[in-house]
Image: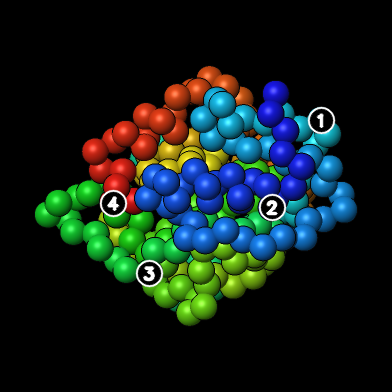
Amino acid sequence: MFHLRSLTHIVAVLVALTSSAGGLVEAALSAIDRPATVDEWAVRGDAWLVGEPESPTTTPYGLPVADRAAAGWGDTHATYPATDVFVGCGATLVSPVWGTVLEVRRVDSYDPAVDDPATRGGRSVSILGWDGVRYYLAHFDTIVADLAPGDEVSLGQPLGTMGDTGRTSACHLHFSISPPCPGKEWSVRRGVIWPSPYLDAWRRGEQLSPVAEVDEWLAANPSACADAMNDPYAPGA
């Protein structure tokens, strides 16, 4: 198996791959500190990028909203795994992990007459967690002004405010968990495993990690990223 020893290497690989494919991250990053408790990092993307940690990888986890007590969500979602989190318009959205920003979409380009699936999230942010998993937050009203791809974010760091941009009829947060892909795509990013059990655990203060489930999904769907990147709508993601 292919092992990467630090988040710096993960980001460097993603930068190199994505810059040739249109790019998620615009420039290579300088060295990023990692927590002493993490011994191995796993890249989760196409099968040839999969790395299996020799020891468990983890990062502290928390709810993606600042007002934990007011947040509510269900355990189902449309036709694919994701969770809609409700607090109220303007509620503060925060990073659920320590990690690195992969994407920031500040412009709501969704047009219901076209219904491009790549733009349904409206204003959105995706983060590569220190655990190697991608966390996607969508339907922002506003996004913190200086947040940019390549920025390191901490658990609970404000990212913006809850809104109803994109394809939605009410203010909420679309929250999804997936492996990162090395190029533009939307169909993996929108969610591949159910987040609600993890949100339930994080609210209780339990550090339940989605790493194993994401790896299992990826092993069962080894061409998922390649297929997603070849989707005709992928360039608009």
Q: Report if the CB atoms under discs 2 and 1 are less than 8 Å apart.
A: no
The disc placed on residue 8 is: 2
In this view, which residue lies farthest toward the top?
A: 220
Q: Which residue is mark 4?
A: 236
Structural distance between the alpha carbons of marks 2 and 3: 26 Å
The disc placed on residue 106 is: 3
Q: Amino acid at mark 3?
A: Arg
* x and y percentages locating residue 130 in the rendered image: 70, 50
Q: What residue is rendered at 72% in x and 60% in y?
A: 32
* Quarter of the rendering containing residue 50: top right
Disc 2 secondary structure class: helix
Q: Can residue 160 be seen in the rendering of this structure?
A: no
Q: Earlier in the sequence, mark 3 or mark 1?
A: 1
Query: Does 4 sit left or right of 144 as displayed?
Result: right
Q: Amino acid at mark 1?
A: Glu
Disc 1 secondary structure class: loop
Structural distance between the alpha carbons of marks 3 and 1: 38 Å
* x and y percentages locating residue 156 in the rendered image: 67, 67
Q: Report if the CB atoms under discs 3 and 4 are less than 8 Å apart.
A: no
The disc placed on residue 54 is: 1
Q: Nearer the viewer, residue 14 or 194?
A: 14
Q: Nearer the viewer, residue 228 or 213?
A: 228
Q: What residue is rendered at 42% in x and 75% in y?
A: 142
Say which of marks 2 and 3 sits in front: 2
Q: Report if the CB atoms under discs 1 and 4 are less than 8 Å apart.
A: no
Q: Amino acid at mark 4?
A: Gly
Q: Earlier in the sequence, mark 1 or mark 4?
A: 1
